[in-house]
Amino acid sequence: MTESEQREAHPSVQEVAVIVGGGPGISSSCARLFAKNDMRVGIAARNPNKSVLQNLEQTLGTRRYACDASDPAAVELLFQNVVRDLGPPTLVVHNIDGRVEGIFRKGITEADPALTLATLKNSAFSAFLVGRQAARLMRENTPDANGAKGTIIFTNASAALKGFPLSGAFAMACQAKAGLAQSMARELMPQGIHVANVPIDAAIGWTQEDGTRAHRLAGTSVDDNMADPDCIAETYLQLHRQHRSTWAFEIVLRPWVERW
Amino acid sequence: MTESEQREAHPSVQEVAVIVGGGPGISSSCARLFAKNDMRVGIAARNPNKSVLQNLEQTLGTRRYACDASDPAAVELLFQNVVRDLGPPTLVVHNIDGRVEGIFRKGITEADPALTLATLKNSAFSAFLVGRQAARLMRENTPDANGAKGTIIFTNASAALKGFPLSGAFAMACQAKAGLAQSMARELMPQGIHVANVPIDAAIGWTQEDGTRAHRLAGTSVDDNMADPDCIAETYLQLHRQHRSTWAFEIVLRPWVERW
Amino acid sequence: MTESEQREAHPSVQEVAVIVGGGPGISSSCARLFAKNDMRVGIAARNPNKSVLQNLEQTLGTRRYACDASDPAAVELLFQNVVRDLGPPTLVVHNIDGRVEGIFRKGITEADPALTLATLKNSAFSAFLVGRQAARLMRENTPDANGAKGTIIFTNASAALKGFPLSGAFAMACQAKAGLAQSMARELMPQGIHVANVPIDAAIGWTQEDGTRAHRLAGTSVDDNMADPDCIAETYLQLHRQHRSTWAFEIVLRPWVERW
Amino acid sequence: MTESEQREAHPSVQEVAVIVGGGPGISSSCARLFAKNDMRVGIAARNPNKSVLQNLEQTLGTRRYACDASDPAAVELLFQNVVRDLGPPTLVVHNIDGRVEGIFRKGITEADPALTLATLKNSAFSAFLVGRQAARLMRENTPDANGAKGTIIFTNASAALKGFPLSGAFAMACQAKAGLAQSMARELMPQGIHVANVPIDAAIGWTQEDGTRAHRLAGTSVDDNMADPDCIAETYLQLHRQHRSTWAFEIVLRPWVERW
C-alpha cells in the first residue's frame, strides 16, 4: 500500500500517538493516558521487550516497535510501520534522555569524546530525526476542526535551561534539543503543527507496583518533591488539545519545593 | 464576624475565584469558565457598572466589586469583602494591563513621567498589592487533597519577554510584574501556593455578541491570529488544577501564526 | 544662555560624564576612572556632601550635584546644571540601587506597600527620568568619529536576572529597569546612542582607605569573591568606547567563585 | 621533552594564544590583535595553506596548524604541537561556524541527517574537544598576578539566542555550544579559568584589501551594519584581561542598527 492508501485505510476515528523512548516513567504514563483518551498508541524503544512495554501491550493494546532513534533509516522505518499498523500520527512525543554509562558527573577534562558524541546523537540528533519524520507525516494530515494537524513534544531537562558543571555533554544535548524545538516551532506552527519543548526541572518519579503514588526523593520526607510522570503526561495531552489561538511552546514543570 | 468565623461560614463546598480587572476579554472568559466549573466568582474593576460585568452578574451570579487596585487600602478592603461575601479564595487572577491614555507609542524623550509612573502603579504595583492580599488569605487555607492552598495568576504581555522600542513604560511595568511573580513563586510554592506568570504574546480577541468566534486581526484574513480569551481562561484553570509535583511557573501563549 | 549657546561654550575638547547616585563603590570608581581618562565628571546624589564626594571634588575636580533622582523636576534641573557647568554629556551612568530601610528580607505578606513603591520609584522610575534627560541631550550631540553620540549605562543587580524570594520589591525594581533599558536600547541605538544594562551578580567590594584591595566577603578567606568597583568602572569605559558595529547591550559581571 | 619540560622551555615572557578556525574574519583579526599585544599566536584550520593564513605567518609570525577540530586525536595533537612550538596557551578561541554546504535554509522535512550531524560535530563537538584540551593545559598554568590561569572563548551566533526557522541544524549546534560554555564556565571559573560565550548577532564584515573598513551589508547604504571583526577581537582581548572579580560569561555583540 502507498502511504495515501494507508491513510485511507485508517480513517480518523481514533487519533494515533507515537512515543519514542520507552520506560516506566513518562513514556508509560503517556501511553496509559493517551490510550484512555481513545488514541491508538505506538511506543518505540531500543529494546521493546522490556516487561513494562509488554505489560502496556497486554493491558492497553499499545503497539511496540524496536528502534534505535539515532539511526536515520531506523526512524524512517519506524514511522512507516506506525502508519501501516495504526495510521498517521497526530501526536508524537520524543522522550529520550540520551545519557550513556560513563557520562555522569564528569568534568570537562575527564569527559570522554566518544561518550559525549553518543549522548549528543542519542538525545538531540534523535530528536531531529523523530521531529523530521513526524513533521513529514503531519504536514499531510487533514486539519482538525480547529485547524491543527498535529503536535510534536520534546521532553527536556533542567540542563536545557542552565548548563550545570560536570555535565557538559548533557548541557550540549539538552540545549541542542531546545534549539531544534524552537526552530521547528517557528517553522511548523504557521503550518498547523504544534511544537513544544517541556523541560522537567526535577527528578522524575514513578508509580509504585501497588499503584500508590508517593513521589519522594530517596532519604527525604517531603511528598511530591519528584515530578509525577502521570502529571507530565497530562500536561502533554493539554498541549495537544490547546487551541491554535493560544499555543504554548515551552512549559517548564517542577515540583512545588524545587529550588530554581 | 472575624475572618476565621467567615471561613467557617463558607465551608469549602465551592471554590472561590477572584478576578481583578474586569473587561470583555480574559476577565469575562475566566468568570464564565470558573462559574461553569462550580466556583463562586468575584470580579473587581475600577468601574464595576460596565454592562459586561452586569451581564455576568445576571447570567452567572458573579459578584462585582469596585476597586482601584493600585490603592493599598482599596485592595485590602476588596479581599475582606470577598471573604465576607463568598469565602476565602483559592484562585486569584490579576488581569490588569495598566496602560493609560497618552502612554502608547511614545519614545523615551517624549514619554510623560506622570503617565509612566501611573502605568507602573496600575500594573506592577497593583499586582503586588493583589498578590500580597491573596497570599495572606491563601496561607490560611486548608490544603486540598493534593496539598495545595491556592493559585495566583498574573496575566502578562509580550513586553515581559522583550522591551520594545517606544514603549518603555509598559516594558518597565510588565517586567516588574514578571519579577514580582518570580519572587512570589520562589517564596510561596514551597508553602503550597501556586504562582504563575502568563505572558500573552499577541493581541487578544473576544467573542462576538452573536456568540461566534473568529479571532482575526483587523484587515487580515487568517483565523486565530488573535489569542482567544476563552482559551486563555482554560490555561488558567489547568494551571490551577496542576498537581504540585509538576507546577508550571510561566506559560507564554501565542497564536499559531505569531512571529517571535 | 540657551542650551545651544552652552554647547558652544563647551567645545568638545573633553568629554563630559554624569554619574547619578554617589557612594564609595561604583560611583567613586567611575568618577576616578573617567577623570583619569580626561573627562569632566559630574556626580549627583541625594546628599552631595558625603565626605567621599567632597574628596572626589578636591582630588579630581568632580562636580557635585544635589538631586533626588525620583523627582522629574529635579532630574531635569540636574541635567540643565550639568550642561551649564560642564557641557553636554556623552556618558551617563545610572547607579542607584534604590532599596530603602525596611524593605530587606521581607516576605510578600509582610512587605510594606509604601516602601515597595518607594523602591520602585528610587530605582526604576529614576532610571527612566535619568535615561530620558540623557537621551534628550545626547540626541543633539555631534556624532564622534565612529558615529556615536553617547552612552547610557544602567547598573543593575542579580534580581534583574532572577526574582529571589523575600525580595519582591527589589525584583520588581531591577526587572523594570532591565525592561526600560531594553526598550531604550532598541529605540536609541539606531540613533547612535549606546544603551547598556549591567547586572552585577555579586556583592560589591570597595577599596580600603589604605589603598589596598582585598575584596572578600566577611568571614571568608577567598580573594575577589566580591566584585571590585574599579573593575566594574573599567567595563563601563569599555562599553562607552565600543565601536557601534559591535555594541553590547548587556554584560553580567560576577566574581570567579560566584554560584549562578 | 615531557610537557613539563616544554613548559620550562617556554618561560612566560610572552603569552600564547591559540585560535581554532582560520579565515579572513574574526580569526585573522584576533591573530593580528593578539600579536600586536605581544602574544605568540597559533592558528589552526582544516586547510592551513589559505593565503590569508600564509600572510599572517609572514607578517606576524603566526604559526599555522592543520587540524580537523571535530577529530579528538587531531585536537589532542594540535595542542601538543602548540605547547612544543609556542608554550602552553593562556588564551584559546574557538571560532568555527561549522555549517556545511547544503545545510542552509532547509526546512525540517528537507534537512539532511548526515549534514545535520556534520554541522553538530563541526561546531559543538569540536568546541567540546578544543575546550577540553585547553582546560587540561590551563589547569597546569601558574596563575597570573590576578589569580587567573587562562581564558577560553567560544564565538557563537544569533542562533544561540533564538532558534530560527529553516535552520534547525544550526540552532542545535549553536545552542549546544552555549550549553557547553555554560557548563564549562560553572566548573572552570572557580579554578581560575575564564570561559566566555560570545554570540555575534549580525553578519560579520571584514577589512578590505586596501585597508579601508566600511562594513555594510550588500545593497545597503548604512555604515557598520555588519560586525567589524577587529572590534570583536578587541572584546575578546578585554575578556581575557578582565579581572576575576568581575568576569563576564556572555557578551552579545550586535551592530547599532541591528533589529533584535
Image: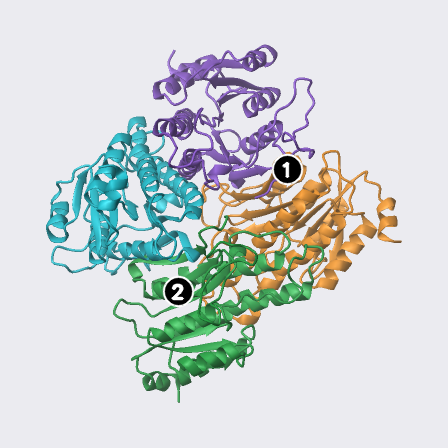
Chain colours: A orange, B purple, C cyan, D green
Report the amino acid beneath label 2.
Tyr
Query: What label sits on residue A72 in the rendered view?
Result: none
Dot 2: chain letter: D
Query: What label sits on residue D236 in the rendered view?
Result: 2
Foreground residue among B7 and C7: C7
Foreground residue among C104 and A24: C104
The residue mark sitting in front, 1 or 2, is 2
- Residue D232 falls in image quadrant: bottom left
In the picture, measured across the screen, residue A54 lies left or right of residue D232, that is right
Residue B228 percent location from the top left of the image: 62, 29
Report the amino acid beneath label 1.
Gln
Foreground residue among C139 and D66: C139
Judge whether residue A109 can be spotted in this image.
no
- Residue B215 falls in image quadrant: top right
Foreground residue among B35 and D12: D12
Dot 1: chain letter: A
- Local SS, label 2: helix
Query: What label sits on residue A238 in the rendered view?
Result: 1
- Local SS, label 1: helix
In the picture, measured across the screen, residue B204 lies left or right of residue A188, that is left
Residue C143 percent location from the top left of the image: 36, 51
Q: Quadrant of the N terminus of chain B?
A: top left
How many residues crowd around disc 2 within 10 Å: few (fewer than 14), some, or many (20 or more)?
many
The correct choice, above or below, for B218 with respect to C35 in the image is: above
Q: Quadrant of the C terminus of chain B?
A: top right
